[in-house]
């Protein structure tokens, strides 16, 4: 999940002074009301020329391995989106190039951040059609599993979906609801919704069950387990039921939810966001979403 994980601010692709300032701004933002959160203060530069040959190699190895499964079992919006943003098999993506392409189709963009963001700050990015991403690459010694996100989880796993207009609107709507609610009840339910869709979602497409959640797209073990393990209960998506289902983070997921379409997800989210935002007098926020 983009908002979790600890900063790796010693990586050469990160300017450590800039990262320290951005992390301090992120930490301070935890106490601010939603309208006062300044997402620009948390952004850092991706010093693209400083990626090492090992960084590009690790990206390439994981890209090739994951695409073997995803060519047949990645959702269409992942596969189409990865072409739209021009993900390459042999090099780490350059966010400037990704953003030029994303901007044209949905107005989304991705921005480097130093590491952990408070939840409300993460949601403030989404509410403005922006995605905070880690820019570091996992070491070669931890290719199979890394507890914190890196650019492979964040950009390979999440960002292709932002090129799809329906998913793009869903995610912004989600961000607005999660940012403006002041209810613990809704906050917990929205965290579950994120987990079972954006992170670990499945979808029926062309008579097959396919992967779209970032945790499944970017993880070899989790991706195969989600589709093949007899121990996984694959439930039809129902927003209320999803929001009532608690999750566990430290092992393969025993319960997953399967969409019939992304319109189903967007429409359910709009209905829920209307309820959440109406409670805090911010229903006008939904009118600003392109749709
Ligand atoms: Fe994630």
Image (tube, rainbow, N blue to C red):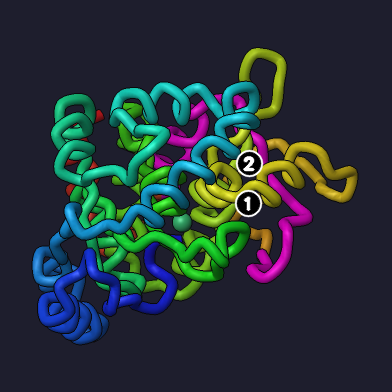
Q: Measure the C-alpha gap from mark 1 to mark 2.
A: 6 Å
Q: Which residue is mark 1?
A: 242
> Label 2, on which residue?
238
Along the line of sight, the residue nearer the viewer: 285 or 12: 12
Q: Position of residue 234 (x, y in %)?
A: 77, 41
Q: Position of residue 87 (x, y in %)?
A: 35, 33
Residue 27 located left or right of residue 37 = right
Q: Which residues are magenta?
A: 247-272
Tell me if 12 is positioned left or right of 272 in this view. Answer: left
- Does 6 appear above or below 70? below
Q: Is residue 274 visible?
A: no
User: Residue 201 occupies which quadrant of the picture?
Assistant: top right
182 or 170: nearer the viewer:
170
Residue ID at (64%, 27%): 73
Helix, strand or loop under label 2: loop
Label drawn at residue 27? none
Q: Residue at x 48, y 59 (%)?
A: 190
Q: Is residue 284 magenta?
A: no
Among the 4 quarters of the image, the one containing residue 74: top right
């Amino acid at each position: 999940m983009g908002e979790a994980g600890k900063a790796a601010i010693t990586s050469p692709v990160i300017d450590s002074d800039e990262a320290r300032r951005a992390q301090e701004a992120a930490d301070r933002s935890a106490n601010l009301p939603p309208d006062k959160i300044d997402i620009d203060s948390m952004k850092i530069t991706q010093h693209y020329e400083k990626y090492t040959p090992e960084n590009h190699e690790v990206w390439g190895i994981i890209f090739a391995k994951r695409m073997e499964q995803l060519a047949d079992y990645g959702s269409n919006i992942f596969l189409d989106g990865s072409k739209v943003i021009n993900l390459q098999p042999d090099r780490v993506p350059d966010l400037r190039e990704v953003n030029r392409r994303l901007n044209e189709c949905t107005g989304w963009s991705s921005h480097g951040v130093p590491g952990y963001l408070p939840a409300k700050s993460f949601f403030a990015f989404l509410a403005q059609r922006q995605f905070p991403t880690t820019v570091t690459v996992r070491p070669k010694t931890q290719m199979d599993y890394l507890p914190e996100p890196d650019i492979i989880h964040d950009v390979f796993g999440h960002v292709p979906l932002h090129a799809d207009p329906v998913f793009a609107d869903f995610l912004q709507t989600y961000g607005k609801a999660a940012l403006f609610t002041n209810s613990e009840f809704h906050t917990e339910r929205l965290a579950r919704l994120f987990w079972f869709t954006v992170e670990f979602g499945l979808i029926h497409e062309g008579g097959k069950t396919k992967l779209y959640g970032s945790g499944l797209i970017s993880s070899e073990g989790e991706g195969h387990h989600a589709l093949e393990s007899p121990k996984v209960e694959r439930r039809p998506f129902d927003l209320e039921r999803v929001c009532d289902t608690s999750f566990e983070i430290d092992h393969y997921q025993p319960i997953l939810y399967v969409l019939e379409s992304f319109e189903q997800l967007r429409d359910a989210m709009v209905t829920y966001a209307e309820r959440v935002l109406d409670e805090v007098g911010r229903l006008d926020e939904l009118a600003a979403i392109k749709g």
